[in-house]
Image (cartoon, helix red, strand yellow):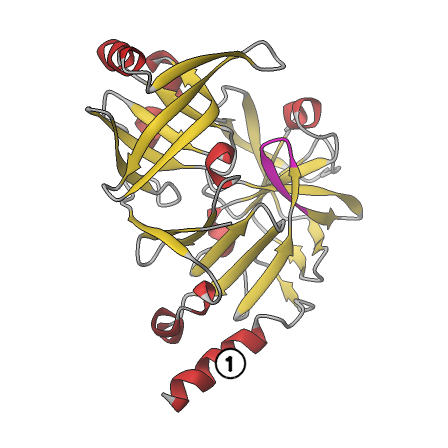
Amino acid sequence: MLLLLLSVMALGTSAQQPAGQVYQDTARLHGDSIVFPLTLVNAYPFVSVEVNGVQGKFMFDTGLNSDLEINDNAVDLPGKKAVKTGQVGSGQSFMLNINDTIAQVRFKNGLTYQHLRHITSANFDFLQRNITPDCIGYIGHHFFDGYIFKLDYLKRKLTFYKATDQRKTVKDFLNGEKVLAILHFETRRLPNHPMVRVRIGNVDLLGSFDTGQYGLIQLDSEAAKTLEASSLLIQDGNDSNDDPIVNVNDIVLDGNFQTSLKGIYPFTYEQTAPFRKGMQIREASYICFGYRFFEQYKTVWDYEEKKIYVLAQ
């Protein structure tokens, strides 16, 4: 017991140390525990960063599988080499480029990378126009591969924990937290998309999680009629962009956690088609948990154990 307590104390101490290290060549996390202050812009979580002397923000997007992607509309990258076209879930297309000329990426917490190679970039001007003008790129899944992370929108904090055998035992990432549920998830073709079984009334859906959106629901026609008739799916007018939104009640995730969501977007099957194939979504009905879920709960994502811990705010 004494050894266990000492381990917990050591892990807690390391989590408070500032991330002031400098790393070369590859954009990957290092160290035992690292905290990034978060800025929320509408539904989207950002971390402050400077790339090649240009100050701005990276969106923390779990829906992105790569490490970093730079907005070359905001950061001049004269040595970029075009490789292929890409597309985001909301439908925008762009040319993806590869860069070996990222001299420095410096985060607000002091974590710094120099001489980065094989970094993807593209013209993400739609993010500047629609979300925030100082969006200079993304952080994706490969950046924190091998880490557990805690997402806390209330305290505006993103904390990464190295997924060690010791940590799996002591679970210091749960210290002082009230665990509401443990969701067991699967992944399919894309390792960055946790997927859970969901039931609303008598309708079965596939659910996934993505920090890069408000949240959406796509139902086949019979399921939509059933849920509307039982007041589990309620039309809630339009948002500020005149897009329709809905409220969804009595959502049960992984058979053990019940919640409701307000203000998510109803999608048609055709609207989900661009990402259904890539994510291997075969189910007729689908729901994605984004900002409207994360504003209600803290979450801890453990990709190795395939668990998401839902915590009280």
In front of the other: 104 or 225: 225
User: Where's residue 280, x and y in %?
Assistant: 28, 31
Residue 45 sits in quarter: top right
How packed mark 1 is, by other alpha carbons closer than 10 Å (few <14, some 14-19, many 20 or more), is few
Image: 117 above or below 137: below
Q: Which residue is mark 1?
A: 9
User: Horizontally, is 132 left or right of 247 in the view?
Assistant: right
Highlighted magenta segment, given as a residue range: 41-47
User: Where's residue 6, x and y in %?
Assistant: 46, 86
In the rendered image, is residue 128 in sight? yes
**Amino acid type, label 1:** Met
In front of the other: 178 or 164: 178
Q: Secondary structure at mark 1?
A: helix
Total number of numbered discs in the rendering: 1
Q: Is residue 132 magenta?
A: no
Q: Is residue 43 magenta?
A: yes
Image: 289 above or below 191: above
Q: Quadrant of the N terminus?
A: bottom left
Residue 159 sits in quarter: bottom right
Q: Main secondary structure of the magenta part?
A: strand
Q: Residue at x 46, y 19 (%)?
A: 265
In front of the other: 278 or 228: 228
User: Horizontally, is 154 left or right of 236 in the view?
Assistant: right
